[in-house]
Amino acid sequence: MEERMMHQVDETVARYGSTDEALVEILRDLSQQAGYLDRPTLAAVAKKLAVPESRVFSVASFYSMISVEPLGKHVIRMCQDAPCHVAGGRKIWETLEQALGIQFGQTTSDGQWTLMPTSCIGLCAVGPVMMIDDEVFGNLTPEKVNEILARYREQDGGAA
Amino acid sequence: MIRSHVLISGDPQSLTRGAEEVRLAIETELHYYGLDDEVQVAFLGHVDRTDVLPLVIVYPEGVRYGPVTPEDGAYIVQEHLYKGRIVEHLQAPPEVLSGPIAHLPGREGAVYAQKRVVLRRAGTIDPDSIEDYIEHDGYFALGKAITEMTPEQVLETVRASGLQGRGGAGFPTGLKWLFVTKTDEKERYIVCNADESEPGTFKDRLILEGDPHAILEGMALAGYAVGAQEGYIYIRGEYAQSCERLERAIHQAEEFGLLGDNIMDSGFSFHIHVHAGAGAYVCGEETALLESMEGKRGIPRIRPPYPTVSGFRNKPTVVNNVETLANVPPIILNGADWYRSIGTKECPGTKVYTILGDVNITGLVETPMGTTLREIIEIYGGGMKGNKQFKCAQTGGASGSIIPPALLDVPMDFRNMAQHGAALGSGALLISSEDTCIVDLAYVLLRFFKFESCGKCVPCRVGTTQMLEALDRLRRGYGTQVDLDRLEEIAEYASQASFCGLGQAAPVPIITGLRYFRKEFEAHARGECPAGVCPMGKHVGPAGEQAHP
């Protein structure tokens, strides 16, 4: 486990160069690969770039594409901005919260879903928009949301 | 899903010239190619052009064909709608909007050509092909600049063109470049700000993905003009596709010797690197962007010194928006006078808008500066959805504001809008109908700023929280006049005292909202939501605690 993590850190640092200027990109890539950054990973990056661990943590906790906490198996990012809101975004929020039984910013107890708000993802012409992991869904309606969630649940073998 | 719209002129003159037959031919051919579900065909009324009837317009590209025969119609379907190639020889001669824009009544029902400068290639070339770009005048401006012009002449041309920053602030681009050349430092940088994240704005993404080489060429021209040899594109981490396209484009340009060392044997070298962000709206602020590029938290720096003096790695740096840079090659190629012939006197050129909200057609449009909001809604937006009444428009994000009906006929450019106390912003036009509640809209806009506040300074960090709480009480029906007064007071403080543009702009929806729709705010303080949108009186959790509905 730890070996694999060290290997990923080495690889990512090699890709961007071991200067502190590359810190944001290194952390983003590592976080995307592992889902989130735990303390040992942050410490390994700090050591590798010869910067204080506090600096690494401060950067990691600043950006929304980098997580320092474990997330659910699927991460739903729902656009919370005005264009999506005007297009009926609130109903979608409510539908998501109801369907998953959690509020925004939370992860379901079975670790399947994390619900997060996101800022504009530039797909406003087809709002309301949400992303599940890397996939984008537009022109959402409450019915569509339930269908999409059902599809994911089915793929996961009816686990959640 | 409808992907294209085909509009055919259906006025009496067009009909006598066979517009019906053209429509039939187009529909038959669409059916043959199985495109019925993807392409919508409709008749237009009067098109204000008699020379090229019947006229056929294909959106989203906005290509006009005319006069069109039924055979032509079938061919257009085959080539344009099926294969995606514009039929050059059938295009109607361009009708260019000239001079300051007349007001709408004089041109009712008219469909006007989009004037495309920035987007002229987007959607018509293969963005992954440098050959395609070169075929469409690509890298000609760079060639012209480094073989025939001195750096000073390039800079002077951009200055004379009157080009202003398209990120929202409208700062003269030539002047920014000039500042950099005035420094003694020889290590200089060009940074392209592609951290597009203003809510409702996606123009930069479409430029980056539709015409990536235009940005590279614009940056190389900037580098040549100011004596920089390194360029960085700071792009949103979320724009993964744009990122790949740019990397590919840079690689191609280097292979062709159009970027890299000793370009075209001129002795001028210019390298471009892509730097992807990791999700933070505040990084669109140029000094926060530079911090992020240096591997730090994206927190704004104090200004002055401005980036033109001390920017990336504390060296003089030009930071320009994507759309701004895309304007540079055509300016160098066609000259400052040509550029000044487009748009308004104070703000030459075009503006790319994203049209959103309660209109029939949403999407991207490029029009000359000076086009009015009414024209955008009526002509490009296809009118208000369901024939509802226009209530207000919100222009993009941090640098935008609320535009009331009274400003519908103001020719939009940076200066005119500023004179009317509004702002053009990044070019997003969120059109709202009478069904929209202004308090609810302000709440959503504020929620965004609170979420994205970097936390560095108190007026923004605490101010956005308190304003959001006050708005939340108002929309839940717990608000009183006291909340309204405090809201106004805090808005004033935050806009005056915040450290950077984010905090200064966060209260703008409240300030402009109160200016134009005070009655509606006051109604909320009495527990009424005139539009019937707000969750008045419904207990949805303790006020202020819930950041999201």
Image (cartoon, coloured by chain):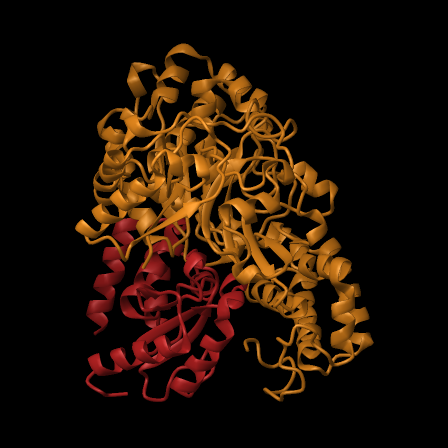
Q: Quick check: B302 above or below B540?
A: above
Pick the residue in front: B345 or B43.
B43
Residue B241 in sight: yes
| Side (left or right) of B480 relative to B348 | right
Q: Position of residue A139 (x, y in %)?
A: 40, 66
Q: Which residue is drawn at 61% across and 55% down?
A: B394
Q: Residue at x 48, y 25 (%)?
A: B186
Q: Which residue is drawn at 28% across and 87% down?
A: A160
- The chain letter corresponding to orange is B
Counting the numbered discs, the total is: 0
Residue B195 in sight: no
| Side (left or right) of B102 relative to B109 | right
Which image quadrant for residue B256?
Answer: top left
Pick the residue in front: B47 or A117.
B47
Quadrant where the N terminus of chain A sits is: bottom left
Pick the residue in front: A71 or B397.
B397
Which image quadrant for residue A154?
Answer: bottom left
Please identify which colour was used for chain A in the image. Answer: red
Q: Position of residue B422 (x, y in %)?
A: 69, 48
